[in-house]
Image: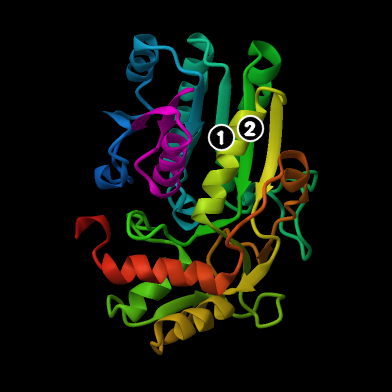
Amino acid sequence: MNILVAGGAGYIGSVTTRQLLDAGHQVTVYDSLVKGYAAAIPDRANFIQGDILDSAALGHVLSIEAYDAILHFAAFIEAGESMTDPGKFFRNNVTGSINLIEAAAAHAVPRFVFSSSAGVYASKNSPLVESDPIGPASVYGQTKCMVEETLEWYHRVKGLRFAALRYFNAAGATPPARGEAHRPESHLIPLVLQVALGQRENIAIFGDDYPTPDGTCIRDYIHITDLAAAHLLALKALDERPRMVYNLGNSTGYSVKEVIETARQVTGHEIPAVSKPRRPGDAAILVGDTSQIRRDLGWIPQTPDLKTIISSAWEWHHTHPRGYNA
């Protein structure tokens, strides 16, 4: 297939691009580089620098050649920031996504795979299934809901075949090539590893009074290569299934304190932790039931163990202490 990957210079997009290329697909990465890194884009991919908010540019790109699918990773992801600057997230994540969906429909791109989020769900104390109530706790989660709803309507009205993949916490790295380096960094595992590298004095625990066994938030972590592999399965399945919504996680939750302790074991560093007040928009528990995609598409995570996930991340961060700027 000839595939356009929006946000292909980012963490998940670049790893998925590599897997698509390895599978024999032709890939063009479309990325503004506001959050992504040119150095993360695989050499075999074509690259066009552009913003999903630029509808004219998107239309031009899709008019140059025919694409069989669009994979959409081009979103702002910081849930905390979305609660202080909601307009930024509605503009990029919703308006930009609509631009991309409209362009797909206008240029007869038949398949669309969307990077959604577990943040669309209302929190509950057991693993979340796809039919559970929608109830985002942040503007970020709300933007993902709105794009999923847009895809539903374009499927009904325009026949666009789509897969919405609701991620839990992507983590780990694919040494030596690609690791997690957000601008700014907001994810727990790389922040913890920055402490081990001496780049910050301690790791903040935002809330230690949640209704969980140790009082800290519980999250489901999935290795980046397993996450990318699910996109290839979903892309192929769109030939037979016109509409899909799946959770992507390991169905196992780990608390913030458990992640920190595992990182101490992996790195051999003390990693001091400091308790701070809760952040707006943080759910107590987000763990996914992934039985549906396992059953339907035969997806099986190959790296489910937290220690292995953190070890792969540590190998990359230890050899790339300045990220892609090294």
Using the image as rendered, state which of residue 151 and residue 248 is in the foreground.
248
Hey, which quadrant is residue 54 in on the image? top left
User: In this image, 39 relative to 312: left or right?
Assistant: left
Identify the amino acid type marked 2.
Ala
Q: Are marks 2 and 1 in contact (CB under 8 Å)?
A: yes
In the rendered structure, find residue 114 and report the number of the disc placed on it. 1
Identify the amino acid type marked 1.
Phe
The residue lying at 32 percent from left, 18 percent from top is: 57
Residue 225 coordinates in the image, percent (x, y): 51, 52
Residue 4 coordinates in the image, percent (x, y): 42, 26
* Residue 42 in sight here: yes
User: In this image, 8 relative to 325: left or right?
Assistant: right
Q: Decide which of tag 2 and tag 1 comes sooner along the chain.
A: 1
Q: Which residue is mark 2?
A: 163
* Residue 145 in sight here: no
Colour logic: rainbow
Relative to 219, residue 263 above or below: below
User: In this image, 174 relative to 69: left or right?
Assistant: left
The residues colored magenta run 1-30
Cα gap from disc 2 to disc 1, whole angstroms: 6 Å
Q: Secondary structure at mark 1?
A: strand
Q: Quadrant of the C terminus?
A: bottom left
In the rendered structure, find residue 92 and report the number of the disc placed on it. none
For disc 2, the neighbor class at 10 Å (few under 14, some 14 to 19, many from 20) is many
The residue lying at 33 percent from left, 30 percent from top is: 51
For disc 1, the neighbor class at 10 Å (few under 14, some 14 to 19, many from 20) is many
